Amino acid sequence: MDTIAKIREKARLQLKTIVLPEYDDPRIVEAAKIIGKEGIAKVLLLTPDKINLEDKERYIQEFYQMRKHKGLDIDTARKMFDSPLYYAAMMTREAKADSFVAGASHTTPDVARAAIRCLGVDERISIASSCFIMVVPNCPYGEDGTFVFADCGVVPDPNPRQLACIALAAAELARKVLDFIPRIAMLSYSTKGSAKGKSIEKITQSLVLLKEMAPTLIVDGELQVDAAIVPEVAKIKYPNSPLGGRANVLIFPNLEAGNISYKLVQRLSNARALGPLLLGLHKPASDLSRGCSVEDVVDCVAVTTIRAQ
């Protein structure tokens, strides 16, 4: 059974309610039908008739109380709830739904802000970030062609501690959703001192912090990507690495590297890219690329269902 089939099957084991607020996007409408037909989740397509006006007013007031110390006024809060995105996020906060998935017609910053503001950041992780599950066909690397890439959507230039927290959150998702032991590579243009630079110093510091946070994780860095995922190259460039060229969780030094890399892999190898899956929040939520397909929506909902189980 391939990775996508395994994800859908695992989602069916314990159905969760997932809200889709972008009710007027035809891809979302078609995906909702497939999700229901295949029994992947209890999907709620948030059409205007599904919005309870009393709940909406209560959500507005609650959101205002949560954010007024940030300078939010009540009129601005009301305008934000003109979009069903914030209603879906507050439903998730209140546990009227288990999660929400959006992004087909909203930007990643819009979806991420709604999730962060309404769901809150997990104090243990301390930063919201994102990852993609990448499924590369006919690929011998990673976990039979499956990888987790992070961060590819939220944090522009993480500091060492943030980078360590991103790696920890991505590893936890790999374990929960994909059922594999995470082998984490902190990626760079350098392999163990083959070059110098501030970026490399950041990565080496983050590696130390990550090992302090989770001593049992299999992790190494700084590594060039070929030394991280190709065993033959790893033997030449760094034979003592605990990864042995078999990394399946790739942590990028900044958002530029992560975003460019996932799109290149997706387009050049016809890979499936599920996400951005938002990490580090009190409850799971997922973004979608605005270029997503119907199948992308279905599979992102399946992943989000597993995370909510």
Image (tube, helix red, strand yellow):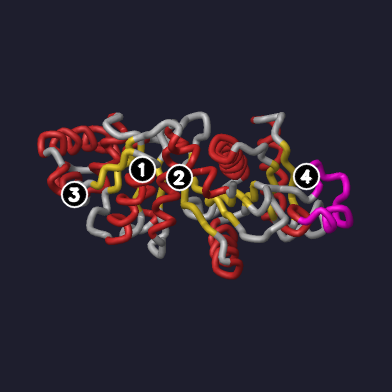
Query: Which image quarter: residue 118?
Result: top left
Q: Which residue is mark 4?
A: 243
Residue 199 on image: x %, y %: 67, 55
Reply yes or no: does residue 77 show up in magenta: no
Which residue is at a point 71% across and 54% down the rendered structure image?
A: 141
Question: Can residue 175 be seen here?
Answer: yes
Residue 218 on image: x %, y %: 73, 37
Magenta residues, start to end: 230-244
**Separation of marks 2 and 3 at Cα, in angstroms:** 24 Å
Tell me if mark 1 has few (under 14), some (14-19) or many (20+) residues whose alpha carbon lies within 10 angstroms of its own. Answer: many
Label drawn at residue 278? 2
What amino acid does circle 3 point to? Thr
**Separation of marks 3 and 4 at Cα, in angstroms:** 48 Å
Which residue is at a point 70% across and 42% down the rendered structure image?
A: 183
Q: Which residue is mark 1?
A: 115
Asked whether 210 or 111 is in front, the reply is 111
CB under 8 Å between discs 3 and 1: no
In the figure, is residue 198 to the left or right of 87?
right
Asked whether 65 or 53 is in front, the reply is 53
SS at mark 4 in the image: loop
Residue 30 on image: x %, y %: 31, 57
Q: Which residue is mark 3?
A: 47
Please tell me which of labels 3 and 4 falls first in the chain: 3
SS at mark 1 in the image: helix
Please tell me which of labels 4 and 2 falls first in the chain: 4
Residue 284 on image: x %, y %: 42, 38
